[in-house]
Amino acid sequence: MTNTKRRVLEKTREVLGLLTHHPLETKTAKELFQSMAVSVFRFSAAQVRWSQAELDQLQSLWTQAYKRAEYLPNGTASDIFVFPKKWGGGELSTPIYIIAQELCNNIRRCLVHDDVAKSITVQELQRAKEEFMCHMTHELYDEMELWQWDEVQHNRWARALKASHRVGVRPIWYLEEVEQEEKRFSWATATRSLRRLKARITKVGGKRDQPTEQEWQLEDAAQWELLFQGEEVFWKTAGAIRAAGYDSIYSLTQDANEKHSHRVVSIPKCAPSESPGDSDGPPESDEAGSESGSESAALQTDSDSGY
């Protein structure tokens, strides 16, 4: 795959040189770059594993080509070319968009027929679910929010869902996934809120060795260490948890309930708010009930007779 990457970079630089002081219109120049450089990358995008550093380098070359197509200097901001149109950007192609498209199309084509390709693709999906402690594909998509691009390169499904998550598109494949009632809440979903909190704290500059109780308003400094250590221990023991048969947090809860639910309690449908032992006075006789029943019968008779 190294030769393929080299070929893509060389072709991109070659087209970039052609756009230097070009006499073409802006639209024609962009179409030229799309057909000569982007198409070369698209051809192998689903198979080649590009690292984040390599994608950044490639996107830098692409944005330079977009600037030259519009006769703009290299110092022009690159965001105006890749931002969505609703934000005022050009929404032009980026490497991560191409990877998301081609990986999703590749997986979709592999799932069309019941053959070896589909069997291999489904097995790879199952390995991704087990690795990231998920049950369903939509959970795997949500889980990719907390993983870096270079950490999911080894699995095609994880790579496709990570790329789709980065571009804000949720792909849909026709998979025969049966969501069992006891497995609807996976370990990844149960722990994601805490792990998302840790990721956000790290992103804004929080460090593990500097709790800073006053800034984060922590009542107990030990909570800070548990936030970091908990995630490490979770992924270190994830395989053992699955091997023990605990596929969901509900499995632990059900086991605990079964140990303490030996006694069956029967509650009557019309149970009184107070038990007989809590009442201070003697129980009421049935005469009042019979009298009220007689009055109701009399009223019903009068109503039927028209009075």
Image (cartoon, rainbow, N blue to C red):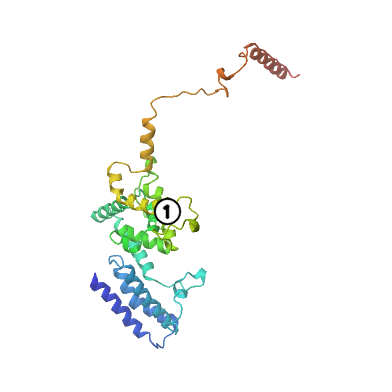
Please tell me which residue is depicted at 42% across the width and 64% down the height of the picture: 167
Q: Quadrant of the C terminus?
A: top right
The image position of residue 161, as x and y in percent, is 36, 59
The image position of residue 47, as x and y in percent, is 28, 65
Which of 265 and 194 lies nearest the eye of the viewer? 194
Q: Residue lying at the far right in this picture: please name it.
A: 307
Q: Left or right: 279 with respect to 249?
A: right
Which of 178 and 268 lies nearest the eye of the viewer? 268
Q: Amino acid at mark 1?
A: Trp
Which of 245 and 22 lies nearest the eye of the viewer? 245
The image position of residue 33, as x and y in percent, is 37, 79
| SS at circle 1 | helix
Please tell me which residue is depicted at 34% across the width and 60% down the height of the picture: 160
Please tell me which residue is depicted at 32% across the width and 57% down the height of the picture: 157
Q: What number of labels is visible?
A: 1
Q: Quadrant of residue 14?
A: bottom left
Q: Left or right: 176 with respect to 275?
A: left
Residue 262 position (above or below residue 44): above
Q: Quick one: label 1, few (<14), some, or many (20+) residues within 10 Å?
A: some
The image position of residue 240, as x and y in percent, is 28, 46
Residue 280 position (above or below residue 40): above
Q: Left or right: 268 with respect to 246?
A: right
Q: Left or right: 156 with respect to 273?
A: left
Q: Which residue is mark 1?
A: 224
Please tell me which residue is depicted at 40% across the width and 63% down the height of the picture: 166
Q: Quadrant of residue 243?
A: top left
Residue 219 position (above or below residue 253): below
